[in-house]
């Protein structure tokens, strides 16, 4: 089948749009796929745009160019296979699509090729969303979709009647008119939780967050990250900043280097004695690809994610069935003041575990303290005192530790951050026979006054300890606070240089601009938060909650489809009404006034004929309605003077006359 | 000049023209529309083609017009043996001076009546038509201007009569208007029969205006205001004639100009300070009826009610 | 007055057209996805599956946006065709074998431009998606707002006589090519097809008995009438050499000749040809030749006798009677 318009074989304008649109949809992948694919794509596209007819492959089936291109494509596919080791994964799949798009556009000379290439462009847009879904991406991709649509439009624009500007306007109109229906579908389309089938392995790389083990340097890496970990919306009361310990995984086992959680514990939570009012809040957790949630110390309930989806353990971790790969939102209640009683044998053993033959010097120190006859409480105090008084520094760039990390830190380098202090402290406690464990999580958070919520960044990542004291139960002890009290009270930001927090140099000069920057940041984060809440994390749960607001708690698929139809049909009818109503061209205001006058006369049975001049009409009308003749002639005279005598000064007078012209219908 | 002055001038001209029309109506009975149209055509510097059967008063009308407007007047009777030289004049070889001397033909006068133009051969016709178009003639390599004002009123028998050479369409375009006189109505006929000889009446007619005044009036007509809205209408008409399938060919730009010029003159004659769509509608039939041919159902052409159809199809913007 | 065809307008828009003319006929408009529209739907489905699988909101949004874009496109495609007024115009006669052009006058009375309206003669085969058979000719045009557009649908004429255009399909896939809105119009006009002019060009001998020569005068060679300045291209034979010899410049003698001949083309003249069609073709050829030579000619064939005449109209009459010869029309 040949191109429909033989005289302009695949019009150039549409080809340019197509090239631009494809390039726009490919560009975001630059970082993710091998550079040579991008280069190959660009070369092919530019080749096609530079000489559209030269690479016309319709004529001969086997031309040299064609064979060359085919070989090139096979080489490309093989190259992708060697690069990724597969051609089905996410990155490999995208690479393949980009490669395909390049070869498709060079082949575009027939109608079908054009459409296929264009649809490929739309599909490439979707692939970008697998990596990022920020507002920026959305805006960029709307532009891309506009350009792709524009290329379709110009392709169907016979003889290129429309200018770029005019066709862009039409394309934009089409897209804008599609938005209402799109919104309805987005809100009401039945959502399914979970993937339909397994996702490629590399689907979730690049998610950051706290690991389920604490190895050297794992936290310091996070501290340099400016990403958001989660956002918290307190219902009524906000706890003090020093209380903001966001509890994550609890680490029990150590091999002297690494701390791990050990086997998962399915025991119920230990009895929790609450000693203060509960704090209610909602957490919007960014995906971190781990099977736990964060909550304020101490979580008082299981965050009902769904049946058997989450539970609370005896050491007050909130565990989930599946890794968190989507942004989720859950409501929590916590008790800042609490008392946990009860420690079973199992736990007692776990909380005193230590690697053998290690930490000799520390052991001796603790022995010495014990010899001095210190009680357990005193030992805790002594240890904290050691940190605060004995030239320990809080630094994010500690010297490298080898051999026995605890001994070396405690007696030689004395420089480190929460990771070092927490692990050393726990080791010391266990040596002294005090049950202790490490808690990973986040500490602090930034209050966003614009959105009235707290943002906890990855840089707030923290490690602290809990020790078992007989009278008090598990008690939180933060050895880092002993070294650097500011770190806890003011937050990590006070300990970090400006460039890590992300204040550009031009804003960091004085406090006023810092304030301004902060303000902007808060607003931007608030917008992002809304975006995340309502767009990105709009899933089955959110949909259910949203519909419940309208009294549609229990709604099944069929009634949702029914709802969609109920909403979409009126929208389409309205659109059709706007598009298809045929109002005559009224043009100038004078003419409109005259038409009004004619309509008034039409009510008396005197109809104006389209080809009838005003004077003739007036004569005819006056003949029929002698009583109105004076008025009719008046109006006609003024109308003629304006419209044919160009005497625009009389427009108000015409307005007045037409308005006051009220013929009685008899 | 302010509007009031213009209005006054227009009104006085209207009075004069009304008087002329009235005078002519004494001789040509019951044909006011035709008289007004032919007067319009002359004031719009156009040439007029009167097509009708013999004996309907074509010649008389021309005569009266010439007399009343004070123009000098020549009549050329077109016959099948008429030569271009008979119209334009000839250079005759003078043996004594051994040179050619030019004897101007009847075309060198202000108003020419080309009687029964379709009886002459196409060569003779085109000699006159070229003179009409250019207001000058070229004889023997020498260009000679024609007097001003210069009008041609041609009469033509309906072309289906025996022994005629119908004017080709391209030549017809040079006539601004084509009018038909038609039979007089009952009352007029009665009066005609009762009254005295028309020839006698002709002798009594005295010029109402002279040629200078005529040129003045022409200029006045050209200054009548034309608004954009009116031009839109005119363009719509032209556009329709060109795009519609009803006609073989569309109207030429020259036709458009003629319509505008005649509509202005008509407006002047009606005393309108500006041109109205009605003015166009009044003059349109006689201007376009010889220019447009309608396509018939079998793919061929007819010539009926063309203007009425066109006017009906095009709404006034 | 030929019929006016109005392509169905949306129910709730005031039908200004109905009152216009009693001769109007309404035609329904149908909408179908094109092949590319189906492909687009397939792509959307793939996108939706992807969106569900990855539970990716933006993918959902894009899928729904493009989905509702195609819904909106239906309306736009429909609007592009709806309410268009089509008038048939009589086609001009053609010679057999030529393309007969059936003119259609498209009247766009709306405020928007109608883009890429395509006309194609429907084939008798079943309607297919986007059919473009090689035989049919496609005519496409844009129509400006409140404008008329004249298009011609070409149809190959095969035999003399009356050619009917039959059903003509009008469709548009504007704006995005995903949907096609179409309607068929039954063209009532028939095109007169003259026989194919074939045969020898030399005319049969003129019937001298009727040659009178009083019909008109043409520039001829008989009587001297005067001099004229020499112009390039004048015959050397006519130069007044005597005057030239007197050194008075180049002049041309002018003459008037008389006489045109009356040519009667008769059935007998072509009786040597084997079949009717070739006879008609020969007559047709002669008629055209006679007209181009400005002769007075007439036609005498069984059942039709046309007096001598001249001019376009006369030629048409003669050719038309040839075209209709023997056919019951």
Image: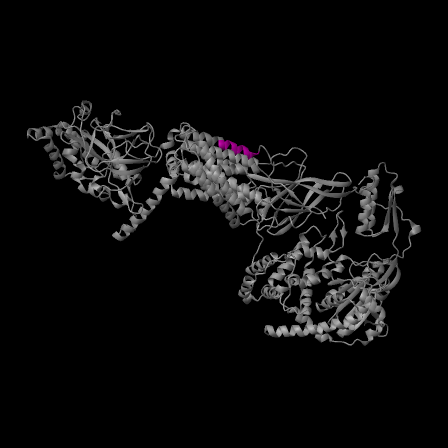
Residue B50 falls within the magenta-colored stretch: no
Q: Is residue C318 above or below residue A626?
A: above
* Quarter of image, res A336: top left
Magenta span: chief secondary structure: helix
Q: Which residues are magenta?
A: A63-73
Q: Residue at x 76, y 57 (%)?
A: B169
Residue found at the far right of this picture: C209
Q: Is residue B52 above or below residue A146?
A: below
- Residue A231 in picture, x, y percent from top left: 30, 40
Which color mode does the image show?
one colour
Is B117 placed left or right of A234 in the picture? right
Is A140 placed left or right of A416 in the picture? right
Is A135 placed left or right of C175 in the picture? left
Is B207 placed left or right of C300 in the picture? left
Q: Which residue occupies the foreground of this view, C298 or B70?
A: B70
Residue B141 visible in the snapshot: no
* Quarter of image, res C163: top right
Residue A71 falls within the magenta-colored stretch: yes
Disc count in the image?
0
Q: Which residue occupies the foreground of this view, A174 or A108?
A: A174
Say which quadrant the C terminus of chain C sits in. top right
Residue found at the far left of this picture: A372
Residue A342 visible in the snapshot: yes
- Residue A433 in picture, x, y percent from top left: 13, 27
- Residue A342 in picture, x, y percent from top left: 18, 27
Residue found at the far front of this picture: A666
């Amino acid at each position: 089948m040949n191109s429909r318009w033989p005289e302009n074989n695949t019009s150039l304008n549409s080809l340019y749009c197509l090239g631009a649109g494809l390039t726009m949809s490919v560009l975001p992948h630059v970082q993710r796929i091998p550079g040579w694919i991008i280069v190959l794509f660009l070369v092919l596209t530019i080749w096609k745009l530079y000489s559209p007819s030269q690479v016309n492959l319709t004529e001969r089936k086997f031309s040299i160019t064609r064979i060359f291109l085919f070989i090139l494509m096979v080489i490309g596919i093989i190259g992708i296979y060697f690069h990724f080791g597969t051609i089905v994964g996410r990155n490999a799949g995208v690479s393949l699509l980009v490669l395909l798009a390049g070869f498709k556009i060079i082949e575009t000379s027939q109608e079908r090729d054009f459409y296929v290439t264009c649809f490929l462009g739309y599909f490439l847009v979707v692939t970008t969303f697998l990596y990022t879904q920020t507002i920026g991406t959305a805006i960029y991709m709307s532009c891309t979709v506009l350009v792709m649509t524009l290329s379709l439009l110009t392709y169907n624009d016979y003889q290129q009647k429309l200018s770029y500007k005019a066709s862009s306007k039409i394309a934009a109109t089409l897209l804008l008119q599609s938005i209402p229906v799109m919104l309805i579908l987005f809100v009401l389309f039945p959502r399914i939780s979970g993937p339909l089938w397994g996702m490629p392995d590399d689907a979730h790389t690049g998610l950051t967050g706290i690991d389920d083990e604490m190895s050297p340097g794992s936290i310091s890496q996070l501290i340099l990250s400016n990403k958001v970990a989660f956002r918290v919306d307190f219902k009524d009361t906000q706890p003090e900043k020093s209380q903001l310990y966001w509890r994550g995984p609890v680490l029990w086992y150590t091999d002297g280097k690494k701390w791990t959680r050990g086997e998962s514990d399915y025991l119920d939570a230990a009895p929790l004695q609450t000693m203060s009012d509960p704090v209610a809040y909602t957490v919007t957790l960014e995906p971190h690809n781990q099977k736990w949630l964060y909550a304020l110390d101490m979580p008082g309930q299981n965050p009902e994610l769904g049946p058997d989806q989450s539970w609370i353990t005896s050491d007050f971790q909130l565990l989930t069935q599946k890794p968190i790969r989507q942004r989720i939102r859950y409501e929590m209640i916590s008790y800042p003041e609490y008392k946990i009683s009860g420690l079973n044998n199992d736990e007692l053993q776990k909380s005193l575990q230590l690697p053998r033959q290690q930490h000799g010097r520390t052991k001796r120190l603790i022995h010495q303290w014990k010899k001095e006859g210190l009680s357990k409480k005193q030992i805790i105090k002594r240890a904290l005192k050691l940190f605060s008084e004995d030239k320990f520094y809080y630094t994010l760039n500690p010297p490298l530790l080898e051999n026995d990390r605890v001994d070396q830190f405690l007696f030689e380098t004395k420089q480190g951050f929460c990771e070092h202090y927490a692990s050393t402290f726990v080791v010391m406690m266990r040596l002294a026979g005090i049950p202790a464990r490490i808690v990973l999580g986040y500490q602090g958070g930034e209050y966003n006054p614009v959105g009235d919520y707290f943002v906890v960044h990855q840089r707030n990542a923290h490690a602290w300890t809990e020790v078992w004291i007989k009278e008090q139960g598990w008690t939180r002890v933060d050895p880092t606070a002993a070294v650097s009290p500011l770190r806890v009270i003011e937050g990590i930001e006070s300990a970090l240089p400006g460039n890590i927090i992300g204040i550009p140099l031009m804003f960091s000069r004085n406090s006023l601009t810092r304030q301004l920057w902060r303000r902007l940041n808060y607003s931007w984060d608030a917008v992002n938060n809304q975006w995340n809440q309502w767009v990105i994390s709009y899933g089955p749960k959110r949909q259910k909650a949203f519909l419940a607001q309208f009294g549609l708690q229990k709604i099944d698929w069929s009634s949702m489809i029914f709802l969609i139809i109920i909403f979409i049909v009126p929208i389409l009818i309205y659109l059709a009404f706007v598009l298809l109503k045929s109002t005559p061209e009224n043009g100038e205001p004078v003419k409109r006034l005259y038409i009004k006058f004619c309509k008034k006369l039409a009510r008396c049975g005197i109809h104006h004929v389209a080809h009838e001049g005003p004077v003739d009409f007036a004569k005819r009308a006056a003949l029929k309605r002698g009583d109105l003749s004076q008025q009719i002639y008046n109006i006609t005279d003024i109308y003629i003077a304006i419209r044919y005598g160009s005497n625009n000064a009389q427009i108000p007078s015409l307005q007045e006359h037409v308005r006051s012209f009220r013929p009685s219908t008899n | 000049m302010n509007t009031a002055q213009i209005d006054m001038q227009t009104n006085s001209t209207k009075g004069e023209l009304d008087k002329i029309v009235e005078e002519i109506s004494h001789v040509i009975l019951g044909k006011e529309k035709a008289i007004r149209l032919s007067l319009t055509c002359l004031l719009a510097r156009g040439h007029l083609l009167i097509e009708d059967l013999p004996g309907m008063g074509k010649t008389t009308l021309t005569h009266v017009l010439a007399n009343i407007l004070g123009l000098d007047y020549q009549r050329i009777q077109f016959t099948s043996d008429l030569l271009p030289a008979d119209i334009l004049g000839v250079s005759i070889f003078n043996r004594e001076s051994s040179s050619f001397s030019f004897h101007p033909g009847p075309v060198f006068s202000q108003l020419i009546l080309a009687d029964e133009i379709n009886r002459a051969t196409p060569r003779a016709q085109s000699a006159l038509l070229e003179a009409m178009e250019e207001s000058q003639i070229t004889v023997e390599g020498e260009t000679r201007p024609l007097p001003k004002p210069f009008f041609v009123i041609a009469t033509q028998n309906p072309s289906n009569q025996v022994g005629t050479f119908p004017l080709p369409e391209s030549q017809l375009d040079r006539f601004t208007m084509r009018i038909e006189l038609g039979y007089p109505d009952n009352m007029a006929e009665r009066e005609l029969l009762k009254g005295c000889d028309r020839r006698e009446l002709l002798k009594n007619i005295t010029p109402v205006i002279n040629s200078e005044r005529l040129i003045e009036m022409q200029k006045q007509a050209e200054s009548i205001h034309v608004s954009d809205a009116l031009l839109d209408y005119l363009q719509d008409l032209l556009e329709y004639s060109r795009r519609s399938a009803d006609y073989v060919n569309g109207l030429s730009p020259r036709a458009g100009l003629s319509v505008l010029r005649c509509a202005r003159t008509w407006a002047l004659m009606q005393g309108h300070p500006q041109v109205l769509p009605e003015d166009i509608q009044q003059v349109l039939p006689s201007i376009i009826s010889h220019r447009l041919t309608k396509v018939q159902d079998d793919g061929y052409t007819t010539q009926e009610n063309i203007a009425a159809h066109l006017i009906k199809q095009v709404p006034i913007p | 007055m030929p019929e006016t065809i109005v392509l169905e307008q949306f129910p709730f828009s005031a039908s200004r057209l109905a009152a216009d003319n009693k001769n109007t006929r309404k035609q329904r408009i149908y909408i179908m996805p094109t092949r590319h529209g189906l492909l687009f739907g397939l792509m959307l489905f793939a996108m939706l599956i992807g969106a569900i699988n990855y539970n990716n909101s933006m993918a959902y949004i894009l899928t729904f946006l493009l989905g509702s874009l195609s819904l909106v496109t239906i309306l736009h495609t429909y609007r592009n065709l709806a309410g268009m007024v089509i008038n048939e115009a009589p086609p001009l006669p053609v010679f057999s074998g030529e393309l007969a052009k059936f003119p259609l006058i498209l009247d766009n009375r709306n405020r928007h431009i109608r883009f890429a309206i395509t006309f194609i003669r429907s084939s008798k085969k079943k309607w297919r998606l986007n059919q473009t058979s090689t035989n049919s000719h496609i005519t496409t045009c844009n129509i400006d707002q409140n404008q008329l557009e004249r298009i011609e649908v070409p149809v190959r004429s095969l035999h003399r006589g009356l050619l009917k255009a039959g059903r003509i399909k009008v469709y548009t896939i504007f704006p995005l090519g995903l949907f096609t809105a179409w309607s068929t119009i039954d063209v009532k006009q028939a095109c007169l097809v003259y026989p194919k002019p074939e045969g020898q060009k030399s005319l049969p001998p003129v019937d001298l008995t009727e040659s009178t020569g009083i019909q008109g005068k043409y520039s001829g060679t008989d009587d001297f009438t005067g001099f004229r300045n020499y112009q390039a291209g004048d015959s050397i034979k006519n130069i007044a050499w005597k005057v030239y010899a007197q050194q008075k410049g180049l002049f041309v003698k002018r003459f008037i000749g008389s006489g045109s001949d009356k040519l009667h083309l008769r059935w007998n003249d072509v009786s040597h040809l084997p079949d009717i069609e070739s006879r008609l073709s020969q007559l047709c050829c002669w008629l055209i030749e006679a007209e181009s030579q400005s002769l007075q000619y007439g036609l005498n064939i069984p059942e039709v006798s046309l007096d001598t005449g001249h001019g376009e109209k006369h030629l048409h009459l003669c050719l038309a009677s040839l075209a209709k010869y023997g056919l019951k029309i």
